[in-house]
Image: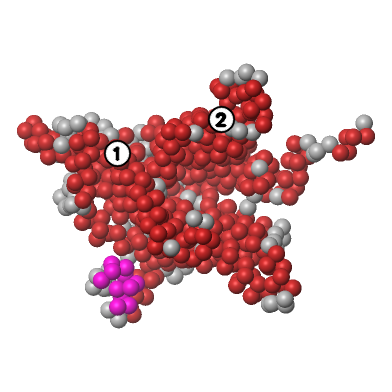
Amino acid sequence: MVGRMVLRRLVAALPNLVGVVAISFVLTRALPGDPAAYFAGAAATREAVEQVRQQLGLDRSLPEQFLIYLQGLMRADLGLSLTTGQPVAQELLTRLPASLELVLIALVLACGVAIPLGVLAATRPGSWIDHLCRIVTTMGVSLPAFFTGLLLAYVFYFLLGWAPPPLGRLDPVYSPPSAVTGLFLVDAALAREPAVWWASFRQLILPTLTMAIFVLAPIARMTRASMLQVLSSDFIRTARASGLSEATVLVRYGLRNALLPVITTLGMVFGFMLGSSVVVEKVFGWPGVGSYAIDALTASDYAPVQGFVLLMGLLFVGLNLCIDLLYTVIDPRVSLEH
Amino acid sequence: MQSIELAPPSVWQHARHVLGDNPVTLLAALLFVVFVLTAILGPNLVPFDPLRSDAGAALQPPSSAHWFGTDALGRDIFSRTIVATRLDLGIAIAAVALSFLIGLPLGLAAGFFGGWWDTLVTRLSDTIMAFPLFVLAMGIVAAMGNTVTNIVLATAIINLPFYIRVARAEANVRRAAGFVEAARLSGNTEARILRVHILPNILPPAMVQVSLNMGWAILNAAGLSFIGLGVRPPTPEWGILVAEGAQFIVSGEWWVSFFPGAVLMLAVFSFNLLGDALRDLLDPRRRT
């Protein structure tokens, strides 16, 4: 039963996957001017340009070009970066863990703050805490991530001196832990290097805080709305009437049922975070895929940018699929519908 | 007449009730007016030429002459921030207007006629939504060329799905409604039904979407300029102004980034609050 549902979800995600690849293809072909001349480099002779044109298949029809593009993707070939001369796919993969570490920790942090806030607001609708929750979260979503980041860096690094300088993942006095997952916190723990773990944890605090502040609003609001709805249902009244403690009613009966729509919102939130990670990485000198794409953009090096857009699209489709699957597994009603 | 007491509350009464419930909304409305006036009058108000540099007065903290201080080239940050309002609001308004004007008819037709057109439009909007939207905007601007027009286009494209979805859902619910059937039976063409009977019903939720979108469009455009896309220096624009001060944060010259960023935040904040208020006013069911 669940197996069939999982399969159905996988099939349903296929069109999005095709869409992401198709748009990425269109973006690679929409470059201003002659893409072949561009990819051949500024100093290329006419023969070299023609050679690149044939290599990329730019002299064929669009459907043929798309097939060639797909074949390239199958081999994980995203072209070469002009500035570094390295394959884009490889560079993206080495930098991806840095970005993922940022996004995942920020997501956990945001949920940890926003869900209790939403529950609190829902238990006292119309009270000062409800209004405060609304104002704080609206302010959070109005703060441009690049501005929050700079502000936090100023206060916690320059004024108070609590945070390390906003320059990268690890203080240069430490060498990075040997790469297993690429996530410094995990790798440092695996290598049993508490000093490195602590140093990379300190570097993570400000950027993840920056990203978490931006997404407090959607999570807190969805939690509040969903909690309000659940708390007004009959089984909550029954639970209260049976003399269960308020904490049990709120968490076991209320929150567990209210979390489902929140999980759906998390998909959207993850998309916001992937977007804001780009500017946050720039502010904190974080060596992730976002700052890689910005550097490439500044140098008019388009293959890395295109690879980055495609990678982000694939990640996002994959995550939404995971959320759908999670939903199917934890909510029995979803699989009973069919 | 006696029956006046039974009449439903007027829009104004309802508006007053909503405003009274959320005093913050009033503040947001005032801020909004200030921003619109600044955008219109901005260049006439400022004390300094926003582009004139003065090497002798570089990186001065806020003072009575330079309210927001000066940047690395000695330009007055207050003047630059005020003048930037027109460009930032202009980009956001143009982008939101574009997605409204394109997304609404697309979604309307999709919801009303259904069939292959519906499939096509829904697929298009799902595909756009399959990307992290800021990243897609980056990709579009990088591909189409680094200009302000393309920033507007990219922001319009990433906002399209929201309008398509709103219009499609509302049209879909109403296409078989009694008043539509009645209009059809009395000989109205489908086009006229869409225009006269369906469209007016879709405008309120679409307007709510517009006001919720505005703040986000400003953030998006400023974010793109911050990473070096779209508006080019020395043109004053909030995102660029913040970016210009970024390197001075670690050495303590906070005012270069702080004031433009704070003004940007205030603008987005007032749009977001107004959007919430408008939603409460027009569409109480969606209140969260």
Q: Nearer the viewer, residue B284 or B230?
A: B284
Q: Chain of mark 2?
A: B
- For disc 1, the marked residue is A27
User: How far apart are the two marked residues, 1 and 2, measured between alpha carbons?
Assistant: 36 Å
Furthest residue toward left:
A47
x 72%, y 68%: residue:
A237
Judged from the image, the secondary structure of the residue bearing numbered disc 2 is helix
State the quadrant of the N terminus of chain B.
top right
Q: Chain of mark 1?
A: A
Up-down relation of residue A155 to residue B146 (above or below):
below
In percent of width and height, residue A116 lies at 58, 67
Highlighted range, magenta: A180-190
In percent of width and height, residue B217 lies at 48, 41
Residue A86 in the figure: left or right of residue A123 = left
Please say whether residue A186 is one of the residues in the magenta stretch: yes
Q: Nearer the viewer, residue B182 or A106?
A: B182
Q: Amino acid at mark 1?
A: Leu
Q: How is the image coloured?
A: secondary structure
- For disc 2, the marked residue is B40
Up-down relation of residue B73 to residue A199 (above or below):
above
